[in-house]
Image: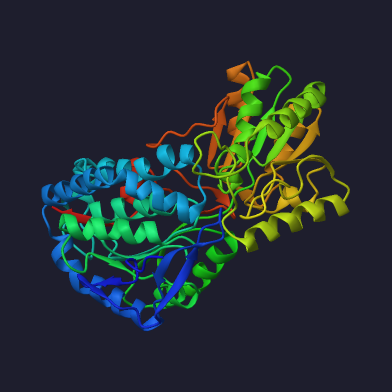
Amino acid sequence: MSDKWGRLLVGGQWVDPSGGTYTVINPATEEAVGQAPEATPDDALRAASAARDALPGWSSTPVEDRMELMAAAGKAIRSRAKELLDLVIAETGATAAVGSRMQVPVAADRFERYSRDPRSVLSRAFVPQAVQATPLAPGGLVSALALRQPVGVVACITSYNFPMVNMAGKVAPALAMGNTVVVKPAPQDPLGVVELVRILDEVGFPPGVVNLVTSSGADVPAALVQCDEVDMVSFTGSTEVGVRIAQAGAATMKRLLLELGGKGACIVLEDADLPAAVGCIGSTWSFHSGQICTAPTRALIHRSVFEETLERLSAYATALKIGDPTEKDTVVGPLISAAQRARVEHYVELGRSEGAEVLCGGGRPEHLGRGFYFEPTLMSGTNDLTPAREEIFGPVVVAICFDDEDEAVALANDSDYGLYDYVFAKDTSRAMRLARRLRAGHVGLNTAQRHHEAPFGGFGLSGIGRDGGDYGLEAYSELQAVIWT
């Protein structure tokens, strides 16, 4: 077991954490991966202060120099892809397929994306206005610019499902805009993020521009949220924690970017391509064991194809290989922890007690004695079931029958969440009409794919703000109007 990850980065120096270290567990083997730094609130405050000190220099650094460092970071991540992949698989339980396609490469993609020239986003000129004299000022022809300025010091706090990717998605646009950052990864799997920060340090980001604190508890991120030195909190994680961040950050008017929970509805109309719809819904099982906020965990299926779709979904779920995530043909890996598996088990049993029918799965795979595994699970019931209303963050789908479009839209919108919904229909104009009626930040029409330049975020309890593409640059900026005659 290595302790090479056991230091924090504060003001350009790798320093010992005040709280020692804690053990990171491999969710597939239940063995130790390594030791992570156990920071304290004082460590967090020192990191925020270092970021504040570095802000004037970094925000005034020429755009070309920032672009060069972003490109170097992307290149360095790719050069260490194999090493980083092994680490990410070990600490997250992501399968080799997900890790090699969606974990490490996408982290590099995000730095490379924000190595593009951002200046087209940084200012907007307005048509001059002829204005009358007022008691405030003489009349004349008035011109104006809207400028995007760095927010300041950004605390980047991420979830455990895609640790490097989520952190890269925050740090890259924040740095490109001229902000400085304090990086706080999820407690369950911080080691890949430690390596990511090491890469940023090695490619030459100035001291204090990127700082790192990790911890197993909530006191360190709480200190960052409450700290006067931090101007913005960018958080990906549960709605419950996001609400606490918003409440605590209000005292110092923190700018917030909150990407929170989801309870995605996949509407399957009577003319849908059923294999395609089943593949989308089945991604709840096959893509990181359902530990993804955009998962279509509610399958809303037209009555005319309900039974056939359930049969197809059951066949799909039971055909997926569950097991060692390092094996190339494994599709379903473990959940992140024993606590998360217990949470999933609780929701399945709660659904049963409320009248849901468990059509497949519903328990731990018998052939796996170690690791935090849970079977792909399909339940049938109503939208009133607790498993249909609350985010489970595991491989559980609830199938719900509907009779017409209005009922489908009403069911989809009958949720506190609104992150990512889906519509499957042969008639794409019909699918588009339904999409316009859905209260969700994203709607996939006959696909589960994403467009990485499109704005990402949700309605309702799914969060505040948008990132992705140029929207990411806007998210980490403040608007300033400059006016002259």
Left of 330 or right of it: where is 11? Answer: left
Residue 227 visible here: yes
Between 55 and 278, the one nearer to me in the picture:
278
In the rendered image, residue 94, in percent from the top left (x then y), is placed at 50, 46
Image coordinates for residue 114, horizontal then vertical, percent: 26, 44
Quarter that holds the N terminus: bottom left
Answer whether residue 465 is visible to the viewer in this image: no
Who's the residue at 68% across and 42% down the image? 413
Foreground: 208 or 201? 201
Q: Is residue 108 above or below residue 303?
A: below
Q: Position of residue 364 (x, y in %)?
A: 72, 50
Horizontally, residue 62 falls left or right of residue 461, namely: left
Give me the residue at 35% from left, 50% from top. Answer: 84
Is 189 left, or right, of 342 in this rendering?
Answer: left
> Residue 454: x percent and y percent?
41, 37
How are the colours assigned in the image? rainbow
In the depicted structure, whether residue 89 falls above or below residue 183: above
Q: Is residue 342 above or below residue 359?
A: below
